[in-house]
Image (cartoon, helix red, strand yellow):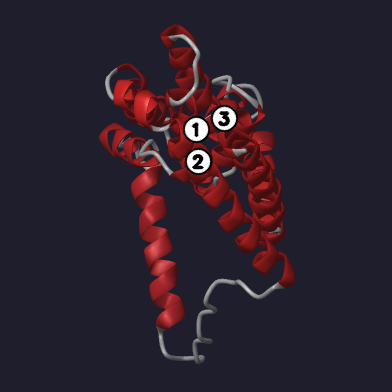
Amino acid sequence: RPAMNAEFFALAFVAALNPKLLAIDLLLIENRRPRAMFLCLLLGGMTVALTVGLLDVLVFHADAINSQKTVSAGVDLAIGLLLLAAGGLLATGRLHGRRKAAVPAGDGQPEKTEKKDGWAQRVLSEPRLGLAMLIGALCGIPGASYLTGLHILVTSKSSTANQVIGVVLFVLIEFLLIIIPFAFLELRPEATKAFLKNTQDWLLSHARRLMAYTALILGAYLAVSGLIRLS
């Protein structure tokens, strides 16, 4: 199969839909040196993500291509069926996160939460470039979507150059929620801040529905693709 197909780009955009990146945007945009903080965050994150991806396609890919032809189809089928099951449970409301117990009034817990939030905001309001690079590096650690995308690249018959381009494109898409606000930061900082807050609220309020639809669509694609290649 081709290296950069619809499944590959779908995984990249799924990886980009990360509410944590929006939260980081909101914190960094209040920094006294937001431009430097955004740059350091991108440097740390993209360096880690690109390093892992390039090592995968340039160093560790030879054995995988020889041994994962039929296995990759079976893996796709298994992942697809799991995603379909998870998507069905999410859509019907049978799979949900554990609800936090209500905090009785007057026990001091809300004050502790506010203090913790205030501490985080105070730390990130100062230009701590090393901390920004560390946070970026943590964000660049591959997740499930990125690892699946790398698997597609490694098991494809595309040239090494195309696989390298695929890694770069995936990482750029994955960090769009940092790159786009950074690009608009200098032009319209207040409008960018308001947009990020509204987008974050919308994503959080529709998180279960979005995850259900994504799991169902991607699961169906993987399951059908795996069945076709196994037949």
Q: Circle 1 sits in a helix, a strand or a loop, which is it?
A: helix
Inspect the image, locate mark 3, and give the three-letter code of the amino acid beneath it: Leu
Inspect the image, locate mark 1, and give the three-letter code of the amino acid beneath it: Gly
Say which of 98 and 89 sits in front: 89
Q: Quadrant of the rendered structure where residue 177 is?
A: top right
Say which of 81 and 209 sits in front: 81
Inspect the image, locate mark 2, and give the three-letter code of the amino acid beneath it: Ser
According to the image, label 1 marks what residue?
Answer: 149
Left or right, residue 164 beside residue 19: left
Residue displayed at 63% across by 50% down? 200
Residue displayed at 51% across by 80% down? 100
- Give whichever of discs 1 and 3 has the lower sequence position: 1
Left or right, residue 80 beside residue 160: right
CA gap, disc 2 to disc 1?
6 Å
Q: Is residue 26 above or below residue 173?
A: below
Q: Residues within 10 Å of mark 1 (few under 14, many from 20)?
A: many
Residue 192 in the image, given as x and y percentages of width and height:
65, 35
Disc 3 or disc 2, which is closer to the eye?
2
Residue 183 in the image, given as x and y percentages of width and height:
58, 22
Q: Is residue 227 above or below residue 100?
A: above
Q: Quadrant of the N terminus?
A: top right
Q: Is residue 198 visible?
A: yes
Q: Circle 3 sits in a helix, a strand or a loop, which is it?
A: helix
According to the image, label 3 marks what residue?
Answer: 176
Which numbered marker is on residue 145? 2
